[in-house]
Image (cartoon, grey):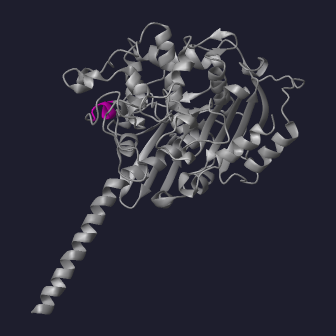
């Protein structure tokens, strides 16, 4: 009798463990398959990469590597499966790739991207920085031989503990080095990940310049009107000090993973979060915050055609990025936290805009003082963060360990920082912009950007 009780007790225990594991796995499957479908769809139909290459490099980790993806070139879609889970992402001109969540595919397919303002120039016949024509005779004083050696170590030899797909540096506004891994080229559009947050910064800056937004006033979110969230300003959002509860851990079923892989309206999901700290008092990095701002930007336009045209007519076309694609969530809001696709030259041009205090090709794009504001540390960030830009304020450091900063770079450096090693470093005192794009996950130690920057600075 005792043996039977032990047996049934153990059986119930193991069944409970298996049930719990199945429930937990079921909660992760939309993330696992959703991440794969969305990543593959964008990589194939925007970056024009081969599926096998994407699987071997970008999707070869954790449970993601066990997914199976079917790429439908006629339908321009990707369906990814793992165990009993399945997700589908579709590509649409203008919108890029969208993970199907909370909306029928037929409904999304019927929505057409509006005709946007054409740039009025051809990059192939226009001089740098607006176009791609470069003068061979321009010298900036940089040691070209050493710089080319750095590019070879970075791109061909994985010499900085990471995998770089593209490397481009500007000195005094001039491209001084440009290198690509074999399957990529100057026309390849690369995923920004969180570097897109800094583009949201630029969009807000332009709206401020036009008198349409005031960052000192409470954010325009109707659902916040009757509670303490009504005190959250646009400045609090830009500086990641909204006080909203948020979990940015990419390794589990966190807020950021739920937002990107479960939700049809990412901005709404983020602004529905409860307040955990008083507004403006606590810094915490939140991708949800960028999507709240993107939602607010969308509300400034009377119809979506004006909204989608805005980023091109007011920013991309003016700084030589007319072919960039800013992807939208299923609700139609640009995913300001994560999903911009642009070339290495595009990202370098964006860095140049901020290096030159918001002026590009002789035209002021951002309001005077906006770059200074963007580089000003958020009050509670220990010098780590400004307004949707990362900072290198080493001397301001209090509780942060030294490895959170780049000790080899000057303190005035600020930068756009993206997941898995996407970077635009802007060094005003050195008149330098450095772009690195690739796949260097922190789980493998990440790219040694400090050593890379040290070597690049040594060529000046």
- If the image is split into quadrants, where does the C terminus sit? top right
Part of the protein shown in magenta? 268-273
Q: Where residue 335 appears, x then y in whole percent?
A: 45, 31
Q: Nearer the viewer, residue 33 or 106?
A: 33
In the image, is 312 to the left or to the right of 228?
right
Against 78, residue 91 (above or below) is: above
User: To which quarter of the image does residue 274 belong?
Assistant: top left
Where is residue 284 drawn, in percent x and y? 40, 38
Quarter where residue 282 is shown: top left
Q: Which residue is drawn at 67% across and 38% down?
A: 409
Q: Give the residue displayed 50% in from the left and 53% down from the top.
A: 69
**Residue 184 shows up from this direction:** no
Residue 350, compared with residue 392, is above or below; it is above
> For this view, does 42 lie left or right of residue 431?
left
Is residue 280 visible from the viewing direction of this image? yes
Question: Horizontal placement of 47 versus 361: left or right?
Answer: left
Which of 242 and 109 lies nearest the eye of the viewer?
Answer: 242
Task: Residue at the far left: name it.
Answer: 1
Disc count in the image?
0
Q: In which quarter of the image is residue 271?
A: top left
Which residue is depicted at the point 86% across and 36% down? 143
**Magenta span: helix, strand or loop, mainly?**
helix
């Amino acid at each position: 009798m005792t043996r039977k009780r032990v047996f049934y007790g153990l059986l119930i225990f193991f069944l409970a463990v298996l049930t719990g594991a199945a429930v937990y796995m079921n909660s992760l499957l939309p993330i696992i398959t959703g991440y794969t479908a969305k990543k593959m769809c964008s990589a194939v139909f925007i970056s024009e990469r081969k599926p096998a290459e994407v699987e071997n490099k970008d999707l070869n980790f954790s449970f993601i590597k066990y997914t199976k993806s079917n790429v439908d070139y006629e339908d321009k879609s990707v369906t990814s499966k793992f165990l009993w889970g399945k997700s589908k992402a579709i590509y649409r001109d203008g919108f890029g790739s969208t993970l199907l969540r909370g909306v029928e595919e037929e409904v999304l397919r019927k929505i057409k991207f509006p005709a946007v303002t054409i740039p009025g120039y051809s990059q192939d016949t226009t001089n740098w920085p607006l176009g791609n024509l470069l003068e061979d005779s321009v010298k900036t004083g940089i040691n070209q031989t050493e710089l080319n050696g750095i590019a070879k170590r970075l791109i061909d030899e994985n010499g900085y503990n990471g995998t770089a797909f593209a490397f481009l540096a500007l000195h005094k506004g001039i491209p001084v080095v440009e290198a690509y891994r074999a399957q990529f080229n100057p026309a390849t559009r690369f995923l920004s990940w969180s570097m897109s947050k800094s583009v949201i910064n630029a969009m807000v800056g332009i709206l401020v310049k036009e008198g349409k937004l005031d960052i000192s006033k409470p954010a325009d979110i109707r659902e916040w009107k009757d509670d303490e969230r009504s005190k959250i300003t646009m400045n609090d959002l830009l500086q990641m000090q909204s006080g909203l509860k948020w979990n940015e851990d990419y390794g589990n079923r966190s807020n950021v993973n739920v937002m990107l892989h479960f939700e049809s309206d990412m901005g709404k999901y983020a602004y529905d979060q409860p307040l955990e700290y008083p507004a403006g008092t606590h810094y915490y990095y939140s991708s949800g915050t960028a999507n709240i701002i993107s939602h607010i930007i969308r509300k400034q336009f009377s119809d979506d055609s004006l909204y989608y045209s805005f980023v091109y007519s007011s920013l991309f076309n003016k700084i030589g990025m007319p072919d960039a694609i800013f992807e939208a969530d299923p609700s139609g809001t640009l995913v300001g936290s994560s999903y911009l696709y642009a070339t290495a030259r595009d990202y370098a041009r964006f860095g140049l805009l901020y290096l030159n205090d918001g002026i590009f090709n002789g035209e002021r794009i951002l309001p005077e003082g906006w770059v200074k504001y963007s580089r000003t540390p958020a009050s509670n960030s220990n010098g780590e963060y400004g307004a949707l830009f990362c900072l290198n304020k080493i001397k301001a450091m209090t509780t942060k360990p030294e490895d959170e900063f780049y000790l080899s770079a000057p303190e005035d450096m600020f930068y756009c920082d993206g997941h898995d090693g996407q970077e635009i470093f802007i060094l005003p005192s050195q008149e330098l912009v450095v772009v690195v794009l690739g796949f260097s996950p922190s789980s493998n130690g990440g790219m040694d950007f400090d050593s890379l920057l040290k070597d690049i600075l040594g060529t000046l």
